[in-house]
Image (cartoon, helix red, strand yellow):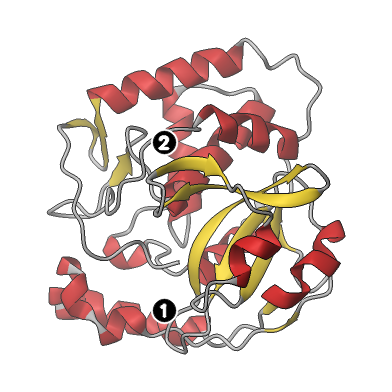
Amino acid sequence: MIRSLFVFFFFCPILLSAQTVCSLESRQLLDKELENLASETTKNQSIQEWVVEIGKDFLGTPYVEKTLEIPGPEQLVINLQGVDCTTFLEAVVTLARMTEMQDLSFEQFEKELEKLRYRSGKNEGYPSRLHYFTEWIVANQKKGIIQDITAEIGGSPYPNSPSFMSENPQFYPQLSEPANLAKIREAETQISQYAYSFVPKEKIQSLEKGIQSGDLIAITTPMANLDVVHVGFAVWQNGRVHLLHASSKNKEVEISALPLHDYLAGNKGQSGIMVARLTGN
């Protein structure tokens, strides 16, 4: 998923290491969450259940775009004051994995978030960040963190050759550097080499029985140059799958009022879903 394009969010950063930036307020929020989770590690829960519990801890958190786009060299930004759909998902997945590992230190959060956010698991500059969510899925499946189960639950082939970033470098200040733009083009070419599946939105209700609470949901688009337009987590409520996500419309983390099938039904810019499941440690 391409992170939202237009609005910068300015906050007071604290330099924690050579490549990590976090505001004091975000550090306090994270420390509080880590403390809460440390008191609950005796619970006999699956990583899927941890995802839902931790995701609900974020309910009401403001939706804020562009929190990762800070000036200068690429740094690992940790911002829990405001999240977009992808940074919300990354924070929850990181915390769920740490809780299952029973390693709830700030340093472990840095390590696991970096592993999740960057292609090789290391910040090697702006182009190494997983900007397209389909590549995020492929890369993190290779790392053993998730499993793409879309085909398994009945998905259909999904053509995927994204080129939005290289075609619109004006939206990305870092792409004013020719070397960065060239590497993004290389990444786009590589993404197009993989096979993908999706569940068309008209089939979500008939196939949702294969989805579990805590599964990662990526919403696909009919736009030829883009892959995914939104992400979140599946949550079963009242016999139907809903979406736990950072909503750009309602400007906060929420559980969708409508079931996932109905949430997509009226949106022409959304074509279906991809589904991934955490593998556990």
For residue 179, above or below residue 211: below
Q: Amino acid at mark 1?
A: Ala
Q: Which residue is mark 1?
A: 187
Q: Which residue is mark 2?
A: 110
Residue 278 appears anywhere in the view: no
For residue 190, above or below residue 107: below
Identify which residue is drawn at 65% across, 29% down: 53
Taking 28 as reference, is 278 left or right?
right
For label 2, the crowd category at 10 Å Cα-Cα, with few meaning under 14, some 14 to 19 and many 20 or more, is some
Q: Amino acid at mark 2?
A: Glu
The disc, 2 or 1, on the residue closer to the chain's N-terminal end is: 2
Q: Secondary structure at mark 1?
A: helix
Taking 111 as reference, is 278 left or right?
right
Gap in Å between the C-alphas at discs 2 and 1?
Answer: 24 Å
Position of the C terminus, as image quadrant, is: top right
Q: Secondary structure at mark 2?
A: helix
Identify which residue is drawn at 21% across, 69% down: 172
